[in-house]
Image (tube, rainbow, N blue to C red):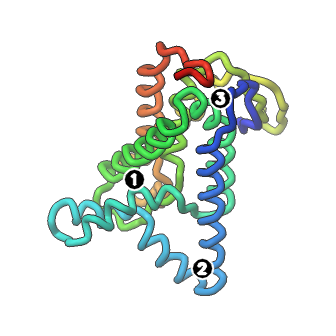
C-alpha cells in the first residue's frame, strides 16, 4: 500500500515540513556531488563521518573514545542523509503527506522539536539493539515514523488516497489513515522480529528505529489529543 495524499485540510502553510523536505533534498544533492567527484569511496566517508555509527557512539559514551561531542552530533546529522533515491523519495512522500497535519496540530516550533526528538529517540533505540555495529545509520525514517505515530492517534478517521496492491493487480482508492499507518507499523514489527539474532540482516536499515519512532509518536499523540487547537490569531 503506497499513500498518495490525504484528505485532511490544514489551517496554515506547513513551513517546517517544507523546510525539512528542502533540507533533505539539498543534502542529497550534495551526496550526489560527492559521489560524482570522489566516487563511492567519498560517499562512504561522508556516511562514516556524518552518519550515526552505533559502535562509535557506544565507545564514546563508554569513555573509550574522546569524540563524544561529534558522536552526539551525528545522531542528528544522520537524519538528513539518505542512501539512495528510493530511500529519499519514500521518506519524503510520507513526511509530505502526514507531516503537514501534525505540524498544524502541534504548531511550528513544537513540531520541529517533536520531529528531532523523535528521530533522536528512534536512533538511540537502534543503537541499543546493535551497539557494536560499524554500519552507519542514515535517513529520516525514525523521525518520520514518529510523525506517522502521532498522525495515527490525532487523525484516525482521516482518509488517505493510496495505491492498494492485490497480488498482481492494484487499485487506487481511499482508505482510513489508521489502516495505512497500522499496516506500516505491523510490517516494521515483523521485519524487526525477523532480524533478531540474524547477523547483518538489517544492513543499515534501522527497523527498530522505525518502531521506536512510531511509539514515540503514539505517546505524543495521546498526550496532545485532548487539547483543542487554538484558533489562528489567538493570543
Q: Which residue in the rendered view is the most extreme toward the front?
A: 235
Residue 39 is situated, as x and y percent measured from the top left of the image, at 60, 84
Secondary structure category for the residue under label 1: loop
Q: CA distance from mark 3 to mark 2?
A: 36 Å
Which residue corresponds to mark 1?
198
Instruction: Kindly identify the residue that appears in the image at 60 percent across and 30 percent down.
Output: 104
Camera-side mark, 3 or 1: 3
Instruction: Kindly identify the residue that appears in the image at 65 percent across and 29 percent down.
Output: 180
Q: Is residue 10 left or right of residue 113?
A: right
Inspect this view and state whether residue 127 appears: yes
Q: Quadrant of the N terminus?
A: top right
Q: Are marks 3 and 2 in contact (CB under 8 Å)?
A: no
Secondary structure category for the residue under label 3: helix
Q: Are marks 3 and 1 in contact (CB under 8 Å)?
A: no
Instruction: Kindly identify the residue that appears in the image at 29 percent across and 57 percent down.
Output: 131
Neighbour tally class for label 1: few under 14, some 14-19, many 20 plus, Cα within 10 Å: few
Q: Earlier in the sequence, mark 3 or mark 1?
A: 3
Q: Is residue 167 left or right of residue 117?
A: right
Looking at the picture, tell me which residue is in the foreground, 202 or 121.
121
Which residue corresponds to mark 2?
34
Q: Earlier in the sequence, mark 3 or mark 2?
A: 2
Quarter of the image where one finds residue 66: bottom left
Q: Is residue 136 left or right of residue 144?
A: left
Considering only vertical position in the picture, is 54 above or below 38?
above
Looking at the picture, tell me which residue is in the foreground, 141 or 225.
225
Which residue corresponds to mark 3?
180
Instruction: Say how many tags the image has.
Output: 3
Residue 33 is situated, as x and y percent measured from the top left of the image, at 64, 78
Neighbour tally class for label 3: few under 14, some 14-19, many 20 plus, Cα within 10 Å: many
Q: CA distance from mark 1 to mark 2?
A: 33 Å
Considering only vertical position in the picture, is 32 above or below 51?
below
Q: Earlier in the sequence, mark 1 or mark 2?
A: 2
Amino acid at each position: 500500500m503506497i499513500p498518495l495524499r490525504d484528505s485532511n485540510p490544514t489551517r496554515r502553510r506547513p513551513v517546517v515540513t517544507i523546510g525539512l523536505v528542502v533540507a533533505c533534498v539539498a543534502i542529497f544533492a550534495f551526496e550526489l556531488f560527492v559521489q560524482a567527484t570522489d566516487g563511492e569511496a567519498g560517499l562512504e566517508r561522508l556516511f562514516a563521518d556524518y552518519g550515526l555509527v552505533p559502535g562509535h557512539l557506544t565507545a564514546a559514551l563508554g569513555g573509550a573514545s574522546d569524540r563524544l561531542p561529534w558522536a552526539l552530533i551525528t545522531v542528528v546529522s544522520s537524519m538528513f542523509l539518505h542512501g539512495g533515491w528510493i530511500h529519499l523519495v519514500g521518506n519524503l512522500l510520507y513526511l509530505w503527506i502526514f507531516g503537514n497535519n501534525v505540524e498544524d496540530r502541534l504548531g511550528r516550533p513544537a513540531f520541529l522539536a517533536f520531529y528531532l526528538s523523535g528521530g533522536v529517540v528512534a536512533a538511540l533505540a537502534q543503537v541499543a539493539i546493535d551497539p557494536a555495529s560499524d554500519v552507519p545509520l542514515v535517513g529520516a525514517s525514525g523521525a518520520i515514523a514518529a510523525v506517522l505515530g502521532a498522525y495515527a492517534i490525532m487523525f484516525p478517521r482521516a482518509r488517505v488516497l493510496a495505491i492498494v496492491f492485490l497480488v498482481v493487480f492494484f487499485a487506487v482508492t481511499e482508505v482510513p489513515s489508521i489502516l495505512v499507518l497500522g499496516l506500516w507499523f505491523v510490517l516494521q514489527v515483523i521485519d524487526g522480529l525477523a532480524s533478531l539474532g540474524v547477523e547483518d540482516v538489517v544492513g543499515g536499515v534501522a527497523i527498530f528505529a522505525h518502531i521506536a519512532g512510531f511509539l514515540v509518536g503514539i505517546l505524543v499523540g495521546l498526550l496532545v489529543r485532548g487539547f483543542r487547537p487554538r484558533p489562528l490569531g489567538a493570543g
